[in-house]
Image: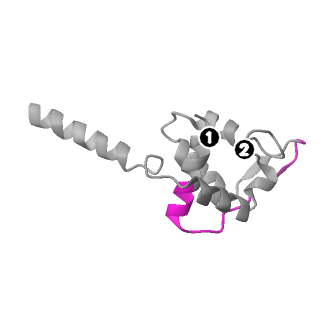
Amino acid sequence: MKIKTISGILSLAGAVLFSPVAAAMDADAAQALAKKEGCLKCHAIDKKKEGPALKEIAAKYKGKADGEEKIMHQITSGDKVKLADGTEEEHKIIKTKDKGELNNLIGWILSLGK
């Protein structure tokens, strides 16, 4: 019984420690990618522009098990989004295919909600 408990604890700890958000996040690299990819044209860190503030996005997904996945989908799928004026357009797709850069960007966005 003790072995199963210890095994379970170690598995959970591993999942938490090695999730993209728990990994070391490079805020400067994330901001540089956001700027390079044009994210900051529609999103500001703490105020609404054409899109919601990044802090608002972080608050929306904070503590949600699928938060990282939903942000990843939004920045890589090109799904339609509703703009501040009520019109819709396809969300810009991040060009990088580097999962590390994408996870770093998502981790940075989520860290803004703290």
Q: Which residue is mark 2?
A: 45
Quarter holding the N terminus?
top left
Q: Real-space Cα distance between discs 2 and 1?
A: 8 Å
Which class describes the residues within 10 Å of circle 2: few (<14), some (14-19), or many (20+)?
some
Classed neighbour count for the residue bearing mark 1: other residues with Cα under 10 Å, few (<14), some (14–19), many (≥20): some
Q: Are marks 2 and 1 in contact (CB under 8 Å)?
A: yes
Q: Is residue 83 left or right of residue 79?
A: right
Residue type marked 2: Ile
Residue at numbered disc 1: 112
The magenta stretch spans which residues?
85-104
34 lies left or right of 111: right
Amino acid carrying mark 1 in the image: Leu
Residue 96 drawn in magenta: yes
**In which image quadrant can residue 29 be found?**
bottom right
Residue at the spot x=66%, y=61% of the render?
Answer: 32
Residue shown at 51% from the left, 52% from the top: 25
Residue shown at 48% from the left, 38% from the top? 65
Secondary structure, mark 2, is loop
Residue 66 place in picture, x, y as percent: 51, 41
Task: Please say whether residue 3 is one of the residues in the magenta stretch.
Answer: no
